[in-house]
Image (cartoon, rainbow, N blue to C red):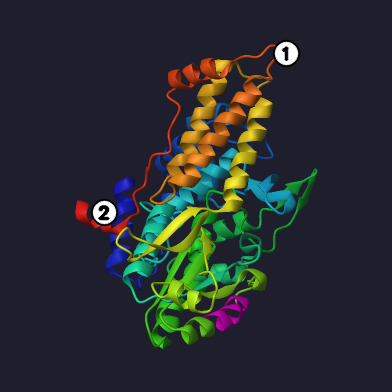
């Protein structure tokens, strides 16, 4: 099965215009369904039916054969997704998620596993989100190198309002039809998109959008924005620009870099109209064009101003200098993300103190701090990371000592416990310095 999917990817790369007309049999293949079941995490939230992976696995082979038979005769109907919310800054209700039933997750993974090789062969290099062998750090690295080494003087920040809730299903089907000619695959995807959302015991039909939380949603969002944004930028915007022009996108977060101010302003003005054609809306209050690059600091100082900064993927980018005085793109954790992370850590510590023993609480706190540093501990961000570790340490000390009326630790004892748990330090984990990394090669 894996060999067949590899061949599909190779064929897609060799023939960029090829439309695949026979894919559906890969989706209902029992071996593929079993492989997708194995990839699912055991402790993930359950859907409307409440079935867990362990329960489904008790009669796994029988369940998979039955699922395969229903898929083969097009008798499979996905259930509605359970609405759940996770905290979101500025929104009291939170970010909405759609939690699929376990069997639906298997089918979503099977569709993704079958179609992904086709689209990976055609996606633009400017797209980094939710793709194999890609990450936020690779996107940040490419962005920093481009600004630092290219002729970039202007950045356009943009934000799409409620992108995942506004994906137009009709356009989605048209985009899928460019490479997928097997109508059964498209019909199955449409069924998943229109399966509905259950909230407060009521099922609401979904006429637009692709719910966050779905296994298939990241791939579908990349396909949609590939045609709406990526191809438009590479085939029209870049060619019409007088100077250099670059685009960087991670899922629905993106920004564009330009050499000249008029190119940046034209892109900013045309972007809203372009998105509007496909049912999307630009958040005007979060969209702006700023001067940023090797000359931005000097130009801002001439006007008696500070050079502009911008936020992308959780980092604030600003114009810095190397030790020798040359221009360098520097990054620090954005104030917003730093505050969110510390509030999350505090909320967890408050709850954990009542249900977790001291040693286990320290180990779990360490895992949280390590996870934070794995993402944010990049070149030039040591100060903010040290501050996070310092605050997290004090928060942990405070709530450990509130487990009972008697203090659990003195500071000396607490430091010994941290040493026992190998408490992390804010060393750089992702080197994004282009000069140092170039020397390493």
- Identify the magenta region: 267-277
Label 2 secondary element: helix
| Residue occupying the point 57% across, 70% down | 158
Q: Which mark is residue 405?
A: 1
Place residue 240 in its image quadrant: bottom left
Relative image position of residue 197 (x, y in whole percent): 71, 51
Q: Earlier in the sequence, mark 2 or mark 1?
A: 1
Place residue 14 in its image quadrant: bottom left
Q: Is residue 407 magenta?
A: no
| Residue occupying the point 74% across, 47% down | 198
Mark 1: few/some/many CA within 10 Å (<14, 14-19, 20+): few
Mostly what secondary structure, the magenta segment? helix
Label 1 secondary element: loop
| Residue occupying the point 42% across, 24% down | 422
Up the image or down, 227 lies above or below 377; here it is below
- Give the residue number, with chain letter if any, for mark 2: 437
Q: Is residue 275 magenta?
A: yes
Mark 2: few/some/many CA within 10 Å (<14, 14-19, 20+): few
Q: Nearer the viewer, residue 57 or 393?
A: 393
């Amino acid at each position: 099965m894996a060999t067949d999917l590899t061949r599909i990817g190779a064929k897609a790369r060799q023939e960029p215009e090829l439309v695949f007309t026979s894919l559906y049999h890969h989706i209902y293949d029992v071996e593929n369904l079993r492989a997708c079941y194995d990839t699912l995490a055991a402790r993930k939230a359950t859907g409307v039916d409440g079935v867990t992976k362990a329960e489904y696995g008790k009669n796994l082979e029988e369940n998979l054969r039955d699922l395969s038979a229903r898929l083969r005769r097009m008798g499979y109907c996905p259930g509605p997704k359970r609405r759940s919310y996770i905290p979101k800054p500025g929104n009291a209700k939170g970010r909405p998620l759609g939690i699929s039933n376990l069997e639906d997750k298997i089918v979503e993974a099977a569709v993704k596993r079958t179609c992904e090789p086709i689209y990976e062969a055609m996606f633009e290099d400017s797209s980094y989100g939710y793709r194999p062998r890609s990450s936020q750090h690779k996107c940040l690295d490419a962005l920093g190198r481009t600004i630092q080494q290219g002729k970039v003087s202007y950045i356009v920040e943009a934000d799409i309002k409620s992108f995942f809730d506004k994906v137009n299903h009709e356009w989605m089907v048209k985009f899928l039809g460019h490479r997928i000619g097997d109508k059964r695959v498209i019909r199955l995807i449409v069924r998943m998109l229109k399966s509905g959302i259950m909230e407060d015991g009521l099922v609401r039909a979904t006429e637009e959008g692709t719910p966050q939380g779905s296994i298939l949603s990241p791939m579908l969002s990349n396909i949609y924005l590939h045609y709406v944004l990526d191809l438009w930028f590479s085939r029209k915007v870049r060619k019409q620009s007088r100077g250099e022009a670059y685009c960087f996108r991670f899922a629905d977060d993106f920004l564009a870099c330009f050499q000249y101010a008029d190119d940046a302003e034209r892109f900013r003005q045309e972007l809203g109209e372009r998105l509007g054609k496909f049912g999307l809306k630009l958040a005007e209050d979060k969209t702006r064009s700023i001067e940023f690059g090797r000359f931005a600091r000097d130009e801002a100082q001439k006007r008696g101003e500070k050079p502009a900064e911008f936020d992308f993927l959780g980092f604030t980018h600003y114009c810095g200098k190397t030790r020798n005085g040359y221009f360098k793109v520097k990054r620090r954790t954005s104030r917003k993300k730093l505050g969110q992370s510390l509030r999350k850590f505090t909320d967890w510590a408050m709850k954990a103190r009542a249900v977790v023993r001291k040693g286990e609480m320290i180990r779990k706190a360490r895992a949280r701090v390590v996870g934070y540093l794995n993402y944010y501990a990049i070149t030039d961000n040591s100060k903010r990371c040290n501050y996070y570790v310092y605050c997290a340490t004090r928060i942990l000390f405070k709530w450990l000592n509130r487990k009972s009326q008697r203090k659990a630790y003195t500071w000396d004892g607490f430091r010994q416990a941290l040493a026992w748990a190998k408490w992390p330090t804010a060393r750089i984990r992702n080197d994004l310095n282009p000069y140092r990394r170039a020397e390493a090669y």
